[in-house]
Amino acid sequence: MQLLEDLRGELDPETHSIITSHLDSCAACKEEYETTKIILSFSAMEQPEAPPENYWVSLLPRIRTKIDAQVLPPADGFLQRYLVPLAAAIVLIIISLRIGDIGSVSNLENTQYILQQVPETELQEYLQKQSIVGIHESKHQSRETILTSDDGAVVSDLIAGKSSVAGYVDEDPVLMYETISNQTANVIASIIASNNL
Amino acid sequence: MMEKTDSELIEAFTNGDESSFNELVKRYQVRVYWIARRSIGNHADADDIVQEVFIRMYRGLVNFRQESNLYTWLYRVTVNVSLNAIRKKKLKEFLPFDDILENILPDGSHTDSRVLDSEYHTILGSAIDRLPAKQKFVFNMRFHDELPFTEIAKILKKSVGGTKANYFHAIKKVTEYIKREINR
């Protein structure tokens, strides 16, 4: 029911007539209509200040600067052969420990098996981020990592029944948002599901 | 010269044409900005969100399967990045996320209005600001962006029925707040 569009005068006469007739017989829609009318009457007074004039021109260059700063150097053979698998194992174990306890040997084997499904390029990117994250770690007593997939959904929200938990230590923010691909988010979800976390 | 479609720009970008990405940013920057601005309530934070959204777009376009249109996907990313930003601003103690969203303070005010650095001082703005985050998003999507409920449901990955219920609760709360304020 296009009540909002009708109140804004955006509908053709025929559709408007259909809506008007419907409102005569539907109390719920009538209530929504009247409520929306009140809100619309106030919305005329709601004029957030526009961004500065040069904002739109300046936005793309700033985005570009950030993107260029995040471009990774090409990995060499040593990195790919040794450090990346090691980092991958550490990464997923840390992630899993943050979400729940997986201390048993069989769970670690399961984790390593699932680990092989994580894209290597993404693990390289995580290594890069870890070197930056290390600066944060030295400043805080503890940290909680909130993982997000690349469309921004929080990984723990992907797991049915779980809620995100985050907080502060000593008034300093300890949250850090690590971005991983949807594929990796699903890998983590399967780790958690397979470990009944 | 005819404007390229989103699909054409995405394809060009995935084939190495960086200017196509620039074109997409210019095409959607205003819309993404105002989604963020209405969610977080101030320009500075909205700017951070917008940049983050387009950086994610840059990373994500190569994997974008075009099952939904690009705007729907961008809207979802903006909602999620905005939600994350709201969480960061709100959290002062260890609480489950759902409690944070619905938390009412002992004096009866809502955490939204106390913690968020909002610029809205009008009655309507304050009313919207007091909505729980998810209701606020649904309200803004329907009221300001005039998205159909089917689209809103897709973006939020919720049912259409649930989305409509969210919207109905939101407008009721907003109207009740407005009536209370004008009758003071």
Image: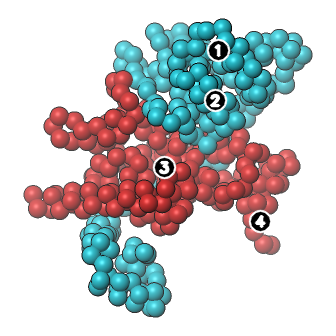
Tell whether label 3 touches label 4 (CB within 8 Å): no
Tell whether label 2 touches label 1 (CB within 8 Å): no
The chain coloured cyan in the image: A
Work out whether disc 1 and disc 4 sit on a shared chain. Answer: no
- Which is closer to the viewer, label 2 or label 4? 2
Q: Residues within 10 Å of mark 2 (few under 14, many from 20)?
A: some
- Disc 4: which residue: B4
Which numbered disc covers residue A190? Answer: 2
Asked if residue A40 is positioned above or below residue A100 in the image, the reply reads: below
Dot 3: chain letter: B
Comes first in the chain, label 1 or label 2: 1
Residue visible at 37% across and 37% down in the picture: B98
Which numbered disc covers residue B36? Answer: 3
Marks 2 and 4, how far apart in space? 40 Å
Which numbered disc covers residue A107? Answer: 1
Secondary structure at badge 3 equals: helix
Marks 1 and 3, how far apart in space? 41 Å
Q: Quadrant of the N terminus of chain B?
A: bottom right
Query: Callout 3, which amino acid?
Result: Ala
Dot 4: chain letter: B
Q: Quadrant of the C terminus of chain B?
A: bottom left
Query: Callout 2, which amino acid?
Result: Ser
Secondary structure at badge 1 equals: helix
Query: Callout 1, which amino acid?
Result: Asn
The chain coloured red in the image: B
Marks 3 and 2, how far apart in space? 32 Å
Q: Residues within 10 Å of mark 4 (few under 14, many from 20)?
A: few
